[in-house]
Amino acid sequence: MLLNRMSLRSTATVGAATLVAGATFAVSAFADDSVDPNVAANAAVPETEESAPEEVVETSEEEFFAASQEIGEDELTTLREQARLERDAALGNRTQTSEAAGSDIEEEKEEEEEELPTYTGDPRGLALEMVLAQGWSAGEFHDCLEPLWEKESNWNHTAQNPSSGAYGIPQSLPGDKMATHGSDWQTNPATQIAWGIDYIKGRYGTPCGAWAHSQSVGWY
C-alpha cells in the first residue's frame, strides 16, 4: 500500500515538473519570435493567482483492499450460475446411481419370480412320476389316484366347488392349504399334485386307501 501512495505522489510531482517545463518552453518560443518577455511570461503562467495546485487524494489501505475485493454484479451472477450447474450435476449423478441400484433390485426380483416351478404338461403324467417316486406301484396311480381326482376335479387345476370352495386338482378345502407347497398353488398343477400326494400319504397311507374312503363316504 506504500507503493500506491508513492505512485500517486510521484504522479503529482511529474505533473508539476511538466507544467514548469511547458511554461519555460512557451517563454522560449515567444522569445525566439521577438515577443516581449513579459507577455510570454503572462501567457505561460495562469492568470488566476488564487488557483491552488490539484489536491492529491491518498487511498488508505482499508479502502484499497475493499475496492480490490468488490465483485461486480455480472461476475457474481456468473459464479452463482456455475455453483447451480455443479449442484445439478451432483444431484443428477446421485439420481442416476439411485436409479441404477433400483433397476438391479428389480432384475433380482424378476429372477426370483422366474425360479418358481411351472408345469404346462399333462398333470396325470406328473402325478404318476410322483407316485412312483414315493415307492408306490403304478397300480396306485392307475387304479386309485387317477379315478379319485377324475371324480374330484376332472384333473382341472382351476376347478372350484361353488358350494364348499374346495379348489384345484385334489380339491383342497380350503384351497390356500396348498400354499405350504408353493405360492403359485392357484395356477400351478405341479404344486397342487405335490400337496395332494403328501395329504393322501399323511391321512390314508396310499392313493388306494384314499380312493376306498371316497368310495365309502363320497369324499376323502
Image (spheres, grey):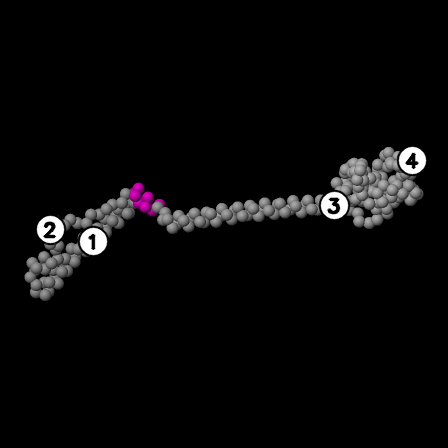
The answer to whether residue 215 shows anywhere in this view is yes
User: In this orientation, does residue 133 appear?
Assistant: no
Question: Which label sits on residue 15?
Answer: 1
Pointer 3 residue: 115
- Mark count: 4
Dot 3 or dot 1, earlier in sequence: 1
- Report crowding for label 2: few under 14, some 14 to 19, many 20 or more residues within 10 A (C-alpha): few
On the image, which quarter does residue 188 sit in?
Answer: top right
What residue range appears in magenta?
61-69
Q: Hey, what amino acid is under mark 3?
A: Glu
Query: Main SS type for the magenta part?
Result: helix
x, y (%) of residue 82?
Answer: 45, 49
Of tags 2 and 1, the one toward the viewer is 2
Q: Alpha-carbon distance for marks 2 and 4?
A: 144 Å
Query: Measured from the top left, where is residue 48 in percent x and y?
Result: 11, 52
Say which element carries label 1: helix
Residue 64 lies in the magenta stretch: yes
* Among numbered discs 2 and 4, the one appearing first in the sequence: 2
Q: Which mark is residue 49?
A: 2
Q: Earlier in the sequence, mark 4 or mark 3?
A: 3
The residue pinned by badge 4 equals 216
Q: 156 or 209, which lies in front? A: 156
